[in-house]
Image (tube, rainbow, N blue to C red):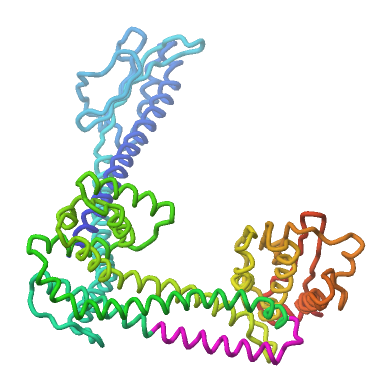
Amino acid sequence: MKIILIIQLVSMSSLLIGFTYVIFSNIADFKEDMKNNAIINATLVGDYCAVPLVFDISEIANETLLKLQNIPSLEVGIVYNDKNKIFAEYYKNGIKIPISNAPKSGSWNKFENDYLSISKPIKYKDNEFAGTIYLRLSTEELSMKINDYLAKMVILLFSLLVVNYFLASWLQKVLSEPILKLTKATKEISEKGNYKLRVHKQGKDEIGVLVDEYNKMLSQIYEREEALKHRTTELTETLRDLKQTQEKLVNSEKMAALGQLISGVAHEINTPLGAIRSSIGNIKNTLNVVFKEYPVFINQLPIDLKPQFLGLMEDSFKNKHMLSSKEERVFKKQIAETLRKYNIENAYAFADTFVDMMVIEDVEKYIDLLQNKDADKIIEFAYKVTGLQRSTENIEFAAERASKVVFALKNSSRINNYEEQINADIIEGIESVLILYNNQIKQGIEVSKKYDEIPKILCYYDELSQVWTNILHNAIYAMDLSGKLNIKAYTEEDKWVVVSISDSGKGIPPEEIDKIFDPFFSTKPTGEGTGIGLDISKRIIEKHNGKIEVESKPGKTTFSVYLPIISNKKEATMISE
């Protein structure tokens, strides 16, 4: 109901402000229209009465005023001569009405009571003053028009408020229902969660709170271990499939390129696997220590130090290790200096442990812990317990990194036996190849990427991956693992998707640039290249009804691949024909 009330108040305020402005604006317009019409009539009557005034023919002026009876709201019309004497006059229904505030000269208009009074001077020939015309009109018709308008606006406002109420009710349901469902689901998970490993809770003191948090952490460890097993199995199967495929397709250019990458790929996979194995070992060791020693340790810990000990671990749990080596050195120095002010022995060792635990702020609140005779043991125990979180973070990061390599391997090594065209994002294929070459690139190649927004196109995705592999491999070889690699993707004339790959290598000699797409021609030394990579790439691009171009000079070689923007097989057939 709060949401409905807020929406109603905001909407009602906006509507009232808007309606007030519109109503007053329109009423002002109504009055302005009436005033302008009266001024026009006064001007016309004055022009017709100018000559009779000059020649003192009041009968003609009276006849002119008599025509004012065609204006229903006009009640009085008086023409004064240049001596401010009544020259001619008209009264509605012939009943003379005393005019107390009728002007004798000058030009003005005024709304007062239920009337509009108009006064204008009458001029003749060379702006010569001949007299004054005075008109008084009833505003009864204007009042009726305004009242009718106000009634319609009130009805419209009420209708909008009714619509706004139902709209607010609908919005409240849309906004709050997902939140209520989320709250209900969260409560059920918290109350009925079935964890594989749990620590029995003995009380509701500080240890009980720690056990609760620990149980939650164990459930996360279990889930991550299960995911890790699944991902490790995928990695093992993928590596086995890759080796089998490499043996079967050893003469294939695509597998040859992957063969050159295999050491780098193995390094990219083995590194996170090593981190995972190390973290799992740390978790097992820490769990053994916690189960065996923690109850004894916490019972022996002085009561006044327990809040500081639990606070230290809580501060460590809520921070992720995201410091560079330089930042770590700075924090260690700052913390060590702070501890020395309190005459803490082994200040630098404690500072080193605090930074590893990511406790880098407000270390003064742990001075009592550090001044205890068993400070080394207390801090070491806190470091071991909090090490569980650091180990799980390492596992999560390493598994994610390995998954990216596996995904790139799958994209680059899969074979489409049926040669089916699919709508694909070619940038995704380029990024997969770059991941596979990451081990070579990180040794000294600076990669610059500029991808415009380009559409998906109908293509042989796996074959295009072979094109990117061939071109990027040649670029890395040409730079000898040191230089700049620029990759651009953009559209041209709404007809082509263009991929431009430039390297800062030594370049292709002018006498050889026309031969690089010939089969078995290679600029590499004998035994380092088959000479069919660019020939295969050109054939694949031509199969897509595209084109590949090359420009080269010392210090810059650019391959540009043009692919037609097509999204269905009918368009592809028309382009082929």
The magenta segment = 227-253
Q: Residue at x 26, y 79 (%)?
A: 287
Image quadrant in which you'd find residue 530: bottom right
State the image coordinates of residue 276 (x, y, percent, origin top left).
Answer: 42, 77
In depth, the one of 451 and 383 nearer the eye is: 383
Question: Which SS does the magenta portion mostly show?
Answer: helix
State the image coordinates of residue 506 (x, y, percent, origin top left).
Answer: 79, 58
Image quadrant in which you'd find residue 438: bottom right
State the image coordinates of residue 381 (x, y, percent, origin top left).
Answer: 23, 68
Q: Is residue 469 visible?
A: yes
State the image coordinates of residue 330 (x, y, percent, origin top left).
Answer: 38, 49
Magenta includes 299? Answer: no
Assign the N terminus to one quadrant of the image. Answer: bottom left
| View extreme (top): residue | 83
Q: Is residue 173 visible?
A: no
Q: Residue at x 78, y 76 (%)?
A: 533
